[in-house]
Image (cartoon, rainbow, N blue to C red):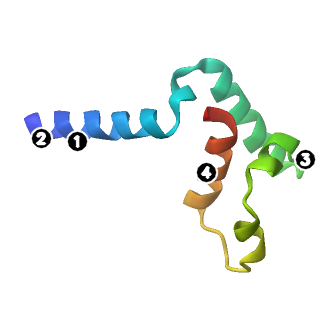
Amino acid sequence: MRSFLFLFSGIFAGLYISWPGILISKNWICFNEIISKSAEKKISIKAVMEVSPNYLISGKNKNISSKIRFVADACFR
């Protein structure tokens, strides 16, 4: 039981250190808007500015975790 407490508190602390705005509801609205607009092919300029050139240059298939990371960086930082 104690190990699960340490595991979850470590995950939470790591997410908070990476994205300090993860607890603010306004940022979650931004996150949901970018996800819904990307499904409609309307991407916000804020999300486009967060994408690094290396990500665009590399022609590899992007997995779901890298896509979520870029959207989260745009909203939670």
Which of pointers 2 and 3 lies earlier in the amino acid sequence? Answer: 2
| Residue holding disc 1 | 7
Dot 2 or dot 4, earlier in sequence? 2
Label 1, label 3: how many angstroms apart (C-alpha)?
Answer: 37 Å
Q: Position of residue 65 (x, y in %)?
A: 55, 58
Label 2, on which residue?
3
Mark sitting earlier along the chain (4/1) = 1
Three-letter amino acid code at the position of disc 4: Ile
Q: Residue at x 18, y 37 (%)?
A: 6
Tell me residue 28's x, y (percent): 63, 28
Residue 1 showing in the rendered view: no
Q: Quadrant of residue 15?
A: top left
Residue type at mark 3?
Lys
Q: Position of residue 43 (x, y in %)?
A: 86, 47
Q: Are dots 2 and 1 in contact, CB under 8 Å? A: yes
Q: Amino acid at mark 2?
A: Ser
Q: Label 4 belongs to which residue?
A: 68
Marks 2 and 4 close (CB-CB < 8 Å): no
Of all residues, the one furthest to the right in this rendering is 42
Q: Please report contact status of discs 2 and 3: CB closer than 8 Å, yes or no.
A: no
Answer above or below: position of 1 versus 41: above
What SS does tag 1 mark? Answer: helix
The residue depicted at 51 percent of the width and 29 percent of the height is 20
Instruction: From the image, tell me which residue sits under label 3.
Output: 42
Please give left or right for residue 13 compared with residue 22 in the image.
Answer: left
The quarter of the picture where the C terminus appears is top right
